[in-house]
Amino acid sequence: MDSTFSKTTAASNDALKNLRESLEPIVPADAVALTCGSYSRREATVGSDLDFYVLVPDVPDHEPDWFTEAKTAITAVVKKPPAAGGAFDSLNRIEELLTNFGGNKDTNQTITRRMLYLLEGDYLTNETLFKSIRRNIIEHYVSGTREDHSIAQYLLNDIIRYWRTITVDYAFKTQEENKPWAIRNIKLVFSRKLIYASGLFSVAMTADRSHDAKVEILEKLFSMTPLDRLIDICGESRTRGLVKSYNLFLSRIDDAGTRAHLEELQKNERDTDAIFRELKNEGYHFASELMMAFEKTFHSTHPIHRAVIF
């Protein structure tokens, strides 16, 4: 990978190291603090916030002192807080992540936390508990697969549901809440699509595997970053083009001027703005490279093809 990804990986790893050292003596031993987003993907750029939340056995009526202290420690390392009112910067019950998969209590926030836990999550404290919860989630999904020859369809359906939820939420946030649209649009066609594709490709790897093998494969793949996951599954030669496109995206989004420009861009400029058009066109190329890697890695007779359509 080129220097852009190397730069963001180094910056992300440094921040995660500092966060883990700061939070270990603060967060209780029966809880786990974790992060999702650019830092966990090792893609932290200029202006990246830290999406994090803490899982506890039970959520107290009032914010405990240690959680307040933990948030202070986090902002000492990463200055930008998560978006207000979102799925992060919160205390949540561990049980909430392990139940109601698709049930009437499976809200937008709970599916977001659960999917990102699997697809890009990384621990900030209590690595052992973090991995145990991840395996528990995987086993819950895989237990819904009846035959060894089948892919983990239950998990696939939730990954697809989450991807479509993201796209619908983008329209809501930019149309009805008037939030900056251009930066969200570009992230949607690169980093959000990468997360989805990495989950899709991972499920495809569970075909013709026993229950236990499915769990082991998913556990291994979900311990990687989304980009490394795709390279592991497809090989370097089949992913060279998409890695190049993704690095261009990272290099542009890591430029403070470009990021500010996209955050302020008006919708009536979408067809004429050179910066937006460059990234949008590269996004189409990135999608084509993902599709090419998918088709070359999984033969047309592979069950993943039918599953994503029907």
Image (cartoon, grey):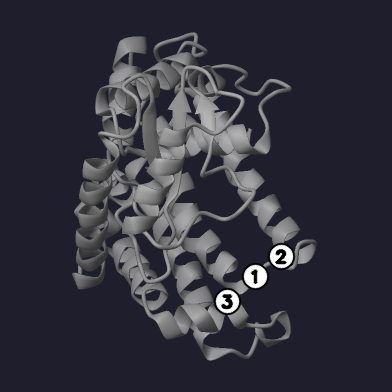
Choose top left, top right, bottom left or bottom right for residue 297.
top left
Q: Residues within 10 Å of mark 1 (few under 14, many from 20)?
A: some
Asked whether the viewer can see residue 173, the reply is yes
For label 3, the residue is 263
The amino acid type, in three-letter code, at marker 3 is Glu
Asked whether the viewer can see residue 307, the reply is no
The amino acid type, in three-letter code, at marker 1 is Trp
For label 2, the residue is 174
Q: Which numbered disc, 3 or 2, marks the residue that appears first in the sequence?
A: 2
Foreground pick, 162 / 174:
174
Give the spatial CA distance, label 2 vs label 1.
5 Å
Assign the N terminus to one quadrant of the image.
Answer: bottom left
Foreground pick, 108 / 246:
108
Residue 205, position as x, y percentages in the image: 35, 30
Choose top left, top right, bottom left or bottom right for residue 276.
bottom right
Q: Are marks 3 and 1 in contact (CB under 8 Å)?
A: no
Q: Are marks 3 and 2 in contact (CB under 8 Å)?
A: no
Is residue 11 depicted above or below 266 in this figure?
above
Q: Which numbered disc, 2 or 1, marks the residue that appears first in the sequence?
A: 2
